[in-house]
Each structure stands twice: as structure tokens, then as C-alpha cells.
Amino acid sequence: MKPADWLFFFCLAFIGGVFLKSFWDTPWLFFLNLAFVSLAAFVLSFFVFHKPVKIFLPISLVFLTAGLGILRTDFKISAPDQLQAYRDNEEIVEIAGKIKGQPSLRDNHIKYTVLTDTFSEKILINAELTEKFNPGDKILIRGKLQTPAEFPDFNYREFLQKDGIQTVAYYPEIEILKEKKWSFLGLVLKAKNKLREANRKIIPFPQGEILAAMTLGDAPLMPQTVKDNFNKVGIRHITAISGMHIGIIAGLLAGILYASPLKNKTFWIVSIFLIFYVTLVGWPASAVRAAIMGSILLLAEKVRRKYFAERALVLAAFVMLLLNPLLLRLDVGFQLSFLAVLGIITTAPFFAQILKRFIRFKYLTQIVAITLAAQVFTLPILIYNFGIFSTVSPLANVLVVPLVPFIIVGGFLAMIGGAIHEWLGLVLAFPVYLILKYITWLSEFAADSPWSFQTISGLHVFWMILYYLILLPFAFWLKRKLPQAELNLLPKTNKNENKNTDRN
């Protein structure tokens, strides 16, 4: 096999190790022993047969890589929790630390992540909207520390655990000790705030909040009624920064660069822009996955190598799980993102073959095929976590998805125009507002229909596992029968990265 094939299987083995440790208490020493036994068999075969049985060496390396995946997950799960002694005891704690990452804006408060100086552990604090700090600022907080709550329908503790947060503080006293003068993230956030301000001036509520979710990653600011309607109709994915959004932005930029004297610099310019944009929207799992796959696609074009979507998907998963293995079990957005793209890669051509007999327009055929493929692969996760199955999703996506590129491109132009002058922003925003108004009306109309969605509760994990055990072999068999290139259906969009948990 080629080196690229070995890399693919090693990445799969690492992901498999992370999976095993995420759901079962799998000892990494067991896989280390298997690796040692395989290596010993490889060496022994040389003495017995005077020629090594080569298969034992890659098997040994695969077991070793899986063991490393287990070990990496074990380190993350067993992270120290020294702040536990100060939580839930009504004691007023005074602790200093630095603001890390991007603040998360809500309707009536703002969330900051603080990395403490003494313990090097994170605290998530809720602060008043008037208390504004920048990434890197050193602050002193005084207040009560608590363990994140576990609600009947939402485990907030596990949701924060994936980000290395085990402690929260609600509205503590905050004193700034030292301001950070400059940082890349601070610069990005200043640009984001400028665009936010322009958006609020040029597009009214709630359409402005929908645009902010689609372009700036501000999904938590969307009204709950809009979120519920979009969930029922199956178009919530358009408000999550996903492969579709990254593909539109990167594709437009790459197209402009290819037609310019900077054609040879396209890979570097687009890659740098993707880093900037993913930082702008807060590094959600779906956007990171899309950015990695997009960069691999551009790199393949640069070095004139063939692009394999499934290998790019596995490499993206490997990179993300190497950095944070808890994403696999605790981040629903991560699960939906990768499953949806896997469904598009394997089964969208099958659906397209069937649909093209009934739909004459190829673009609409692809939209429906991609939607069905993504929905088939994400259906158990959606039902298990959210209890909603949309029966009108394919039709709704046909009526909505073709308009998304116009919203994203037009929305950015309008916000940039609004940052220059309000009247320029209003003129540029008017077509975008009409499209968003139409989508809002459509979602309200469809969601009010009793047949638009079904509520399913209490799905047992056994049925979910059985579903994928049957689906995955069948899907890969279909992929071999219907090659992707035959239909020109590249997996550049993801139609079900729609359920990033943004509560609280």
C-alpha cells in the first residue's frame, strides 16, 4: 500500500481507540499488548519461515495507534479538578485568571472563560452585558463557584466538560488587573463587533439575528421560537456555520483569486482566510471540519493530486480528536457534522440516481439527494438527542437552500456597507431582508402544520447502534456501486450540522 493508505488506516485506528474509550472503559495496555504480540509474530516469522510475514507489522502499528487513541482520551477524561474543593459550599472565592477564547454573547448576559492562575483550570462566568473584557485580559473574580447543572433534557455539565470546563460562576464581582493591549483574537473580535453593530442597524428583528447566526456564528442570539420552527421544518442547519457556509465563502474567494494575478497564491490566501473566519465564528466543530477538508481540497489542487473526500473526512476527524477527544462523545454538533458528510459521500449518488427520474433540474436533484443522504445518517442522533423528526425537510430544503449563497454573500456585503455608512448598508441589505423574511414566513407556516414534524421520545441507544451497524455496510456497498465522480456530486456541503447545543 501507499504511504497515504497507511496514514488513512492509522488515523482510523486512532479514531477507533477514542471511540472505544469514550463509551467503554477500555484499557490502553490491552492494545499495547496486542501490538507487542503482533510485532513478536512478525519477528518470529522471520526465524521460522526465513521470510517475515509482513501483515503482522502493520497490524502491530494499528493496535499501537488505537492504544494511543485510548490513552489520549484517558488523559482528557482524567483531567485534574482542584477547584472541586471550592464548589457548591457557599464560600466566597477570590481567584485571578486570564480571559481565554471568544466571549459568548446572549440576550441578557455574556459568558467568559477564565483560565485561573493558581490551578490552571477553566471557570465559565456569567457577567452583565455592560462588563466587557477582551481575550488576554487578566481579571480578579469574587463569588461562589458551582458545578454545572444537569437538567432533565440537557446535561450542561457534560456539555462544558468537552471544553475542559468543570466550574461555573454566576455574576461574580469582576475587577480588571491588566488589560491585553493587542492579540490576533482581539483584532478578529473587533471586526466581528463592527459587523454586529452594522447588522443591528440595517436588518430588523428577527431577520437580523438569523443573518448573524448564518454569517457570524451568533446562533445563541436567535429567538427560541425561530429555532423551534427551523427544527420542526428541518432547516436549522442553515444557521450553523458548516461545510455549506465555508464552501460558499472559500469557493467565492478562490474563484476571484484564480481569475487574478494571485492565482498561484490561492491555497495560502484561502487557507489564511479560513483560519480568520473560523476564529471569527468561534471554532465550532462543523466549521473546523469544513475548513480542514476545504484546505485539503485546495492543497490537492495545488499539488495536482486527486482529492478523496472520505480520506479528508477521516484526517479532519483525527486532527480534531487528537486535540480534543471528548468531542466524539460529548459534542452533538461534531457527531452530526461528520455523519452528515459521511452520508453525503456514500449515499447521495444513490438518491440522485433515483431522483433524476422525477426532477429535471440537476441542481434541485442534488439538493434533495444531499438532504436525504444527510438526514438518513443523522436521523438516530437527532431523535436520540432532540426527539424531533421533520417530515417536510426535503421540500423545505429545496425551497430554502438555493437562497443560502445569496444570504451569505449579500449579508456580508450589507454589513460591510453598513459599517461604512448606514444608508449604504440599508440599500445592500434590502434584498437579503426579503429573502430572510420569506424563510421566516415559510418556517412559521410549515411548523404550524401538524404533519410537518413528529415527536419521538425515549429512543434506546441499542436501536441507534443497530441502525448504524446495518446502514454503514450498506452505504459503503452503494458507494462502490455508484462512484461519486459519475454524478459530479462533491461533498462540499453539509445539510444537518444544525443542532449545536446553544442553551444557557
Image (cartoon, rainbow, N blue to C red):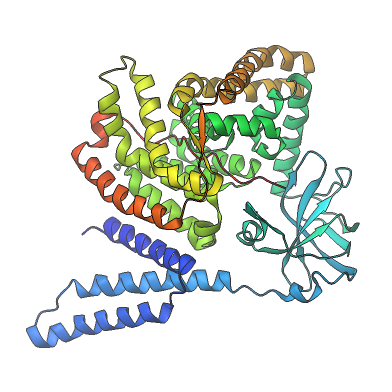
Q: Is residue 292 in view?
A: no
Horizontal relation, residue 292 to residue 183: left or right: left
Q: Percent position (x, y) of residue 159?
A: 63, 56
Asked if 140 appears above or below 447 in the picture, the reply is below
Of the pair 212 and 195, the residue shown nearer to us: 212
Q: Percent position (x, y) of residue 31?
A: 36, 77
Please name the residue shown 47% across and 66% down the image: 23
Please name the residue shown 72% across and 59% down the image: 149
Please name the residue shown 39% across and 41% down the image: 297
Horizontal relation, residue 9 to residue 53: left or right: right
Of the pair 114 and 447, the residue shown nearer to us: 447
Q: Percent position (x, y) of residue 167?
A: 74, 64
Q: In the rendered view of the protein, which quadrant contains the N terminus?
A: bottom left
Of the pair 122 and 447, the residue shown nearer to us: 447
Tally of numbered discs? 0
For residue 89, which quarter of the picture?
bottom right
Horizontal relation, residue 358 to residue 154: left or right: left
Of the pair 73 and 383, the residue shown nearer to us: 383
Q: Percent position (x, y) of residue 165?
A: 68, 62
Horizontal relation, residue 267 to residue 232: left or right: left
Q: Is residue 63 in view?
A: yes
Asked if 322 appears above or below 441 in the picture, the reply is below
Residue that sits furthest to the left in the current view: 49
